[in-house]
Amino acid sequence: MAHWVEQEGRAGIMDYVAIRSGHPPTRGLRILVMKHITLIAFAALAACTGKPSFNDASLSDVQFDLESFFDGDLIAYGQFQDVLGTVRRSFVVTIGGDWDGERLRLVEDFVYEDGSVEQRIWTLVKTGPVTADQTWEGTAPGVIGIAVGQEQGDRFNWQYQIDLPVPAADGPTETLRVSFDDWMWQQTHDRLLNIAYVKRFGLDIGQVVISFEKQ
């Protein structure tokens, strides 16, 4: 067993990345993770200027391709911050994607900064044309009804309502029903930026910013 795992038996983010890579949390590994966190912080700051739309100018020349990008293994680094800009949670998520020509299945395994874990499994199907401006629908445990999305240019918009498990200080885990308005930009063929605007009862409560990389 790796000696850098926390004695309590729960791995934090650095420990988890180290275990996934098979190497101790060296200075180089810490710098890599910090670079991702810095990118996320800058993206979160930029997101405060207003919500994006399909009318905005493209950020790259890459055509967003959902099924191609998420087919295979990915790793992502993210954080949730409230409306005041305070970071409330950070996490690493590994994703295993499989596109069979009709359905895209995503298995997402989250590890949070406190060592807690969560898994979410998405099933997505393409509902629009096979060329530009494709539309999608998706389901996952906890998602209320059907999630809907659209690709256009270098970006993808994904909207859904979900009951999120929220750890309680004492007693059983509670759930919080929130709405997500995800905007994703494919920056390169192996890198993607995701900013999700989170609402509860129609009011903004924060943002989730995630940087994805294909493995």
Image: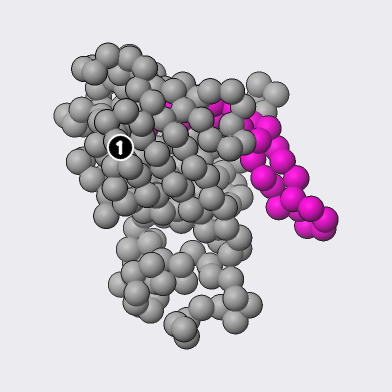
**Residue 149 rendering spot, x and y as whole percentages:** 41, 22
In front here: 86 or 93?
A: 93
User: In the figure, 169 relative to 56: above or below?
Assistant: below
Q: In which quarter of the image is the C terminus?
A: bottom left
Q: Give the range drawn in magenta.
A: 158-187
95 horizontally vs 67: left or right: right
187 relative to 207 in the view: left or right: left
Q: In which quarter of the image is residue 112?
A: bottom right
The residue lying at 58 percent from left, 71 percent from top is 10
Percent across and percent down for residue 140 are 53, 35
Membership of 170 in magenta stretch:
yes
Q: What element carries label 1?
A: strand
Residue 177 within the magenta-colored segment of the rendering? yes
Determine the image quadrant of residue 188.
Answer: top left
Q: Which residue is drawn at 45% across and 53% down?
A: 93
Q: In this view, does 17 lie above or below 180?
A: below
Residue 202 visible, this orientation: yes
Q: Is residue 181 visible?
A: no
Q: Mark 1 points at which residue?
A: 99
